[in-house]
Amino acid sequence: MTLLLYAIIKVLAHSARLLAHIALDNLTDRYDNNEVKLVDRGRLITNDKQLNRTLAAWAKVVEASAWKHFTDVRNTYKTADPVKGCVVFDIRNNRFRLITRISYKMAVVVVDAVMTHADYLRWSAK
């Protein structure tokens, strides 16, 4: 019984290592291909149809980007600012703020929140 349990654990450990290598290879391939992955895209859906169109256009630009540093983001979006470890984008002529976290090494943009300007001012003051 102990030998069987040991064999099962060994197989599971080997499988876990294989899965980790596959995941790392996929991340490396994505990074090498300069494709940015957008995470938590569902947070980009609001009750405002015009805002949804603006956010969809933003997402399309992000997914086609090859940002390696914040300066690359700033070259794409002049109004983007680093705030509290996040990158904040002005949306719809300063009426909304899109709060994101960006891992340039992993080529991943995580959407944290979409806020009105007033909500953003309260958030940034904390």
Image: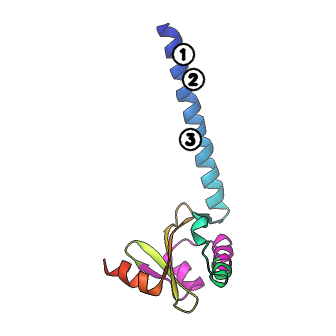
| Mark 1, other Cα within 10 Å: few <14 / some 14–19 / many ≥20 | few
Check disc 3 and report its element: helix, strand or loop: helix
Q: Is residue 15 magenta?
A: no
Q: Earlier in the sequence, mark 2 or mark 3?
A: 2
Contact check, label 1 and label 2, Cβ < 8 Å: yes
Residue 38 image point, x, y percent? 60, 65
Image quadrant of residue 56?
A: bottom right
* Identity, as a three-letter code, of the amino acid under mark 3: Ala
Residue drawn at point x = 66 percent, y = 70 percent: 63
Which element carries disc 2, helix, strand or loop? helix
Front-most of 107 and 91? Answer: 91
Question: Which image quarter: residue 29?
Answer: bottom right
Numbered circles on residues, count: 3
The percent coordinates of residue 110 (x first, y second) are 53, 65
Placement of the C terminus among the 4 image quadrants:
bottom left
What's the residue at 61%, 60% (across, down)? Answer: 31
Q: Which residue is mark 3?
A: 20
Residue carrying label 2? 11
Query: Residue 16, position in %: x, y?
Result: 55, 34
The residue located at (58%, 73%) in the rendering is 67
Residue 72, percent from left and from top: 55, 79
Sequence-wise first label, 1 or 3: 1
Does the magenta portion include 58?
yes
Secondary structure at badge 1 equals helix
- Residue 7 - label: 1
> How far apart, in angstroms, are the residues tagged by discs 1 and 2?
6 Å
| Position of 23 relative to 3 (above/below) | below
